[in-house]
Image (spheres, rainbow, N blue to C red):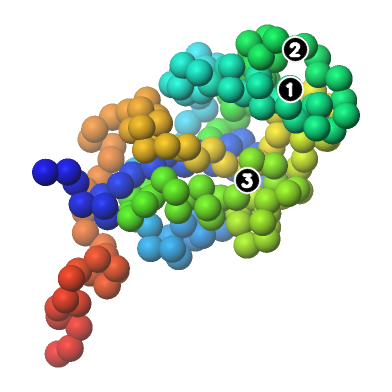
C-alpha cells in the first residue's frame, strides 16, 4: 500500500543570499502557514562536489539547463555564448557550484499533501523579477536573468525547491540521513487530514 498523500516530502534549500539577507524566518513562515510540516533541517556549507552531485541527480540536467539558457538568450535577441547545450549547461553548473558553496545554506525537508507542487507554487518562478506577487521570490527579491547574465553569475533567487517527487526523494537522501528526518505528530494535522475531525468538541 502506498503512503498517504499527507506524507509526501520535498527538499527546500535556502541559498546563501537568503541566509545573508536574514530571510530564514520569513521563508519558513510562508511554508508553515500553508500547513506543511518541517521534518528535517540543517545548516551547512556544502562543498562544490556536493553541489555538483545535487544538480546532477537528474542526468539530463546539464542538457536541459543548456537548452533553456540558449532559448532565453535568443528570446531576448542576444547571441548565446555557445549553441552547444552541454557547454552552456556546464558553464551554468560551474557558477552554481561557486555560489552554493560560498556560505551557509539551510537545507529543509517539508512534508504534507502535494508538498512538491505546493512548495514550488509558493516559492515562485526561477526569475524573481517575473515571479508572481504573493510568492516568496516575487515578494522578497528583485534579481533578474539580465543582471545575472551581465555579471556572469547565477540568478540569486533565495531558494532551491525539488522539481519532482522523484527528484525530491533523491535530493533528501543526498542532504539527510534517515535519522535526521523526523516522524512526529502536529496537532494541526488533525484539522488538515483527519476524516471526521474527531475531538474538536468537548
For residue 188, what is the image quadrant? Answer: bottom left
Number of the label disc, if any, that sits on residue 70: 1
Query: Where is the C terminus found, in terms of image quarters?
Result: bottom left
Residue 86 in percent (x, y) is at 63, 11
Asked if the residue under mark 2 is in contact with the one under mark 1, i.e. CB atoms within 8 Å, the reply is: yes
Residue drawn at x 71%, y 34% is 155
Residue 77 in percent (x, y) is at 88, 29
Residue extending furthest bottom?
A: 202
Residue 133's place in the image compared with 107, above or below, is: below
- Helix, strand, or loop for circle 1? helix
- In this orientation, does residue 115 appear? yes
Residue picked out by circle 2? 83
Q: Residues within 10 Å of mark 3 (few under 14, many from 20)?
A: some
- Residue 135 falls left or right of residue 81: left
Cα separation between marks 1 and 3: 18 Å
Asked if the residue under mark 2 is in contact with the one under mark 3, i.e. CB atoms within 8 Å, the reply is: no
Residue drawn at x 53%, y 21% is 61
Q: Earlier in the sequence, mark 1 or mark 2?
A: 1
Amino acid at each position: 500500500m502506498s503512503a498517504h498523500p499527507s506524507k509526501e516530502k520535498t527538499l527546500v534549500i535556502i541559498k546563501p543570499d537568503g541566509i545573508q539577507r536574514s530571510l530564514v524566518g520569513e521563508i519558513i513562515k510562508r511554508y508553515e502557514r500553508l500547513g506543511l510540516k518541517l521534518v528535517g533541517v540543517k545548516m551547512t556549507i556544502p562543498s562544490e562536489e556536493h553541489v555538483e552531485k545535487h544538480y546532477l541527480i537528474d542526468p539530463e540536467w546539464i542538457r536541459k539547463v543548456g537548452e533553456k539558457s540558449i532559448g532565453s538568450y535568443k528570446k531576448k535577441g542576444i547571441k548565446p555564448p555557445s549553441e552547444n547545450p552541454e557547454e552552456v549547461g556546464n558553464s551554468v553548473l560551474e557558477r552554481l557550484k561557486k555560489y552554493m558553496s560560498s556560505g551557509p545554506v539551510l537545507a529543509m525537508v517539508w512534508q504534507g499533501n502535494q508538498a512538491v507542487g505546493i512548495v514550488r507554487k509558493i516559492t515562485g518562478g526561477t526569475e524573481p523579477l517575473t515571479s508572481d506577487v504573493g510568492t516568496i521570490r516575487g515578494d522578497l527579491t528583485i534579481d533578474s536573468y539580465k543582471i545575472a547574465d551581465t555579471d556572469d553569475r547565477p540568478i540569486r533567487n533565495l531558494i532551491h525547491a525539488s522539481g519532482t517527487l522523484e527528484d525530491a526523494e533523491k535530493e533528501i537522501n543526498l542532504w539527510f540521513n534517515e535519522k535526521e528526518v523526523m516522524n512526529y505528530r502536529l496537532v494541526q494535522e488533525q484539522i488538515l487530514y483527519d476524516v471526521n475531525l474527531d475531538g474538536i468538541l468537548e
